[in-house]
Structures are given as structure tokens and as C-alpha cells.
Image (spheres, helix red, strand yellow):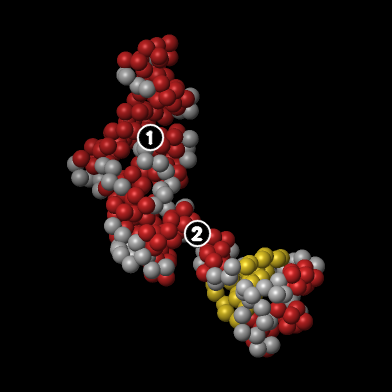
Amino acid sequence: MIYIFIGEEDYLIEEKLEDLNFKNKVVFSLKDKELKQKLTQYLNQRLFSTEDICIVLKDGDKIDLDIDFLNFIKNKNVVFIFKQKTEVFLKKLKDLKIPHRVEEIPSLSFKKPEDFLGFLIKYTEQHNIHIPTKILSALSEVFLHHPTILLNDLKKLKYYKPNGTFTKEEILNLIRWPTDSQIFELVDALLDRKYENFIMRLKREIVIGTKIESIIGFLYKTLLRILLIKKIKPYQTKLLNTLDIKPAYQWKLREYSKKISEEEIKKILQTLSDLDRKYKKFILKEEDFVYEFTRAIKSS
């Protein structure tokens, strides 16, 4: 049987290859000038094997496969991998009456969470993983720019609970989140200007139930301590000791103080104060907090 995978997502292609369930799989490049010789040698080595083998041929684009070669592999299990659909190749298979199956591999590049959500709904249905849409919606936001991390763990869920529906608590415990459990990591991403990373971590904290007031309070307290360290450099150690801060955290605060100016800290503190006031007065909704905060710090 000839299989044709069309797409560029290595993760999903590898997943499709696993689904074929061939124990013996070997990969060759169609660009290799000695391909037929190497294939012949490999097949001769497996001549008396009772197990099915699968030949994977990559780099298929812009390669004109001759009829002789297609006849050579037509009775084998072969997977062709193309980045784009090739009508010429498909026509040759049809003319030669070679059985084949075409599968287009979707892209894992999503601009909006709702696009990723649509993919996740189909993906979980195909893999028989039962997760409420509301939870999938939250996951689509947190993992928007890290889809393979999520997909890799979703596949493991079906072995944990094959026929049941997963709860929010189970998802939080079983999925390997793209951050550790400490909200402290937010500061690293913020001060390193890794805004995409910062947004991901911020959304993650909200999804797992960290209150907006707690996030604002933590960031405000940490930035205020950094500001104090910058303003009272000769007394840093004494100041940190009076705040009863652990040595590792003291070191981090000193390092942070080198990454950001007093003016930048004051602007972020003002932004946090404004957002806190709006949130407490119900002017700012929880779902708008991430957007408003990141918009403000990027423009400052």
C-alpha cells in the first residue's frame, strides 16, 4: 500500500507514521542518487522476515519519480512525504493502478486561540480523548504558541482514562504545563522582555485559578523590592535581610535590578495600580486583563 502524507508538521507526520503500526520502519531520501540501490540492499536483507516493513521516502517535492521506480515499490508498504500536493505524482499512481491513500497534514501554526480550539476539538475526537470544550478553550489560549507540548501530553491521557471525561483538576495535574508551578517565573519573562513567554505564563496562572489580585500583588511587591534595591545600593544586604528574603531570592532581585531602569519600574507599577483599580471597580474584566497589561508594558 502506498501512503502519501502532505504537510510540513514533523510532529503530526511522525504521529501518522506511528498510527500505521509498522514495527519495522526505515527512512530514505528521494534526493539520494543511490536510492534504488540502497532500497534493494535493504529489501534483500529483510527477504526472509515475517514482519511487515514500512519504507518512508521523504524530500518528495520537485522529484520526478519514473515509472520503473514506482513499479519497483508498488507492492511494498511505502510512505511518501511531500510538503505540497503533487498532481503529477498522483496521476502516475492512478495510471499505473497502484493503490494509494492521500492524507493532508494540518499546520500547527495558529494565529488565534479559536483556530487552535477548532483543531483541538477534532484532534481529541479522533483520538477518543474526552475533554469538555470549556477546558479545551482554556488550553488553546495557554498553548497557542506551544501546540506540540500539549499534543504530546494529550496522547498520554487516553491511557490514563480511556473512556471517561477528564475534569479540570485532572487536566491540571496530568498535563506538563509550559511553565513550572511558581508564579515567580512571570518576572523572569517580563524583565527579559520575552512577552510571548510572559503572556503564556500569565494565562496559565489565570487558567489554574490564580486570582488577578494575587498576580497583581505579586508583581507589584517584587517590582517594588527591585526599585528599593536600585535606590539604596549601599544598603542592599541589610535591606533584604530586614525583609526576611531567602538568599536565592536576594540574588535574583539583585540580578533583576541590573535588567530594568527605575523609570521602567515606575511605569509598570503605575500600570499595575491602574489595572488593579479598574478590576476592583469592575471596569476591567478578567478575560481582558492579559491583553490590557501586555499592551501597556509593550508601549511603555
User: Which of disc 1 and disc 2 is earlier in sequence?
Assistant: 2
Give the farthest residue toward the left: 281
190 versus 105 height, above or below:
above
The residue under the point 29% across, 54% down is 168
Q: Which residue is mark 1?
A: 184
Residue at 65% in and 85% down: 98
Horizontal side of 73 relative to 224 (left or right) equals right
The foreground one among 65 and 197 is 65
Q: Nearer the viewer, residue 133 or 247?
A: 247
- Give residue 76's position: percent from left, percent from top: 66, 78
Task: Please report the residue visible at 38 percent of the width from the left and 68 percent of the height from the top.
Answer: 128
> Could you say where residue 187 lies in the image, as x and y percent from the top left?
40, 34
- Residue topped by disc 2: 109
Q: Nearer the viewer, residue 91 or 80?
A: 80
Give the percent coordinates (x, y) of residue 37.
80, 70
Q: How many badges with numbers are in the image?
A: 2
Report, in whole angstroms, how far the alpha carbon at label 2 lies from the one at label 1.
Answer: 29 Å
Residue depicted at 68% across the width and 81% down the height? 74
Q: Nearer the viewer, residue 17 or 85?
A: 17
